[in-house]
Image: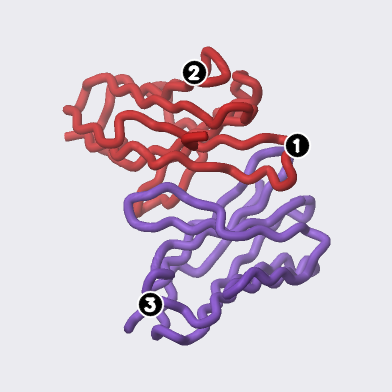
Chain colours: A purple, B red
Amino acid sequence: GEDVEQSLFLSVREGDSSVINCTYTDSSSTYLYWYKQEPGAGLQLLTYIFSNMDMKQDQRLTVLLNKKDKHLSLRIADTQTGDSAIYFCADTNAGKSTFGDGTTLTVKP
Amino acid sequence: DAGVIQSPRHEVTEMGQEVTLRCKPISGHDYLFWYRQTMMRGLELLIYFNNNVPIDDSGMPEDRFSAKMPNASFSTLKIQPSEPRDSAVYFCASSERGSLTDTQYFGPGTRLTVL
């Protein structure tokens, strides 16, 4: 079946850039997503990229997609303490999404 | 819209008791998903519905778990009898197929503790 994998933890200093990586197996995914989960809350869509794109930029967020390698990354520029959260990568096919296990981002002041 | 609504937000029960979790999806969404999140297993898809019909329940752990969607605005996830290993946060999410992105919108979750 489909699988989405990500590293579990990332720690950065405030002001640095954060890069969270993800690999997926479903080559027919239409969209790929990054969701953010803050403590005690549900997942919230952060950004997405259409599968025929290779880059998308949205303010401090940059999403890179390498479809050949099935690799997705999320770069957060000028990381702030408020960015500390769990970040989930997900793909979608026929309405159903497969989520990775989430990367816990810790931002140190 | 108020978003996906789940109730209760917290539930503490004793082993062997029946637990019912409730979800109201966003109006107009035709997909509804139930997830379970634990530290050990991460986010697991339990079951999802399309137009109130269960499509894939392969993630339901065992027969003690059941889910229903009697109409487009309400779904329940029932655990009977509950066990301590069912302790987790249960999320409901909904989406609109045919929307631009098939984005799932998550509820705030129900934190279940089984003693």
- Please report whichever mark, 1 or 2, sits nearer to the chain's N-terminal start: 2
Residue type at numbered disc 2: Lys
Viewed as shown, does residue A40 lie left or right of A8?
left
* Label 2 packing within 10 angstroms: few (<14), some (14-19), many (20+): some
Viewed as shown, does residue A102 lie left or right of A22?
left
Q: Residue furthest right?
A: A52
Viewed as shown, does residue A19 lie left or right of A42?
right
Residue type at numbered disc 1: Gly
Q: Which residue is mark 1?
A: B98
* Label 1 packing within 10 angstroms: few (<14), some (14-19), many (20+): few
* Label 3 packing within 10 angstroms: few (<14), some (14-19), many (20+): many
The answer to whether residue B31 is above or below residue A34 is above
Instruction: Please name the residue shown 63% across and 57% down the image.
Output: A33
Q: Which mark is residue A107?
A: 3
**Foreground residue among A53 and A77:** A77
Q: Which residue is mark 2?
A: B68
Could you say where residue A28 lies in the image, as x and y percent from the top left? Answer: 79, 51
Circle 2 marks a residue in which chain?
B
**CA separation, marks 1 and 3?**
37 Å
SS category of the residue bearing label 2: strand
> Would you identify the image quadrant in which residue A27 lies?
bottom right
Residue type at numbered disc 3: Val
Between disc 1 and disc 2, the foreground one is: 1
Could you say where residue A57 lies in the image, as x and y percent from the top left? Answer: 68, 71
The answer to whether residue A96 is above or below residue A44 is above
**CA separation, marks 3 and 2?**
41 Å
Q: Are marks 1 and 2 on the same chain?
A: yes
Circle 3 marks a residue in which chain?
A
Instruction: Please name the residue shown 39% across and 58% down the image.
Output: A38
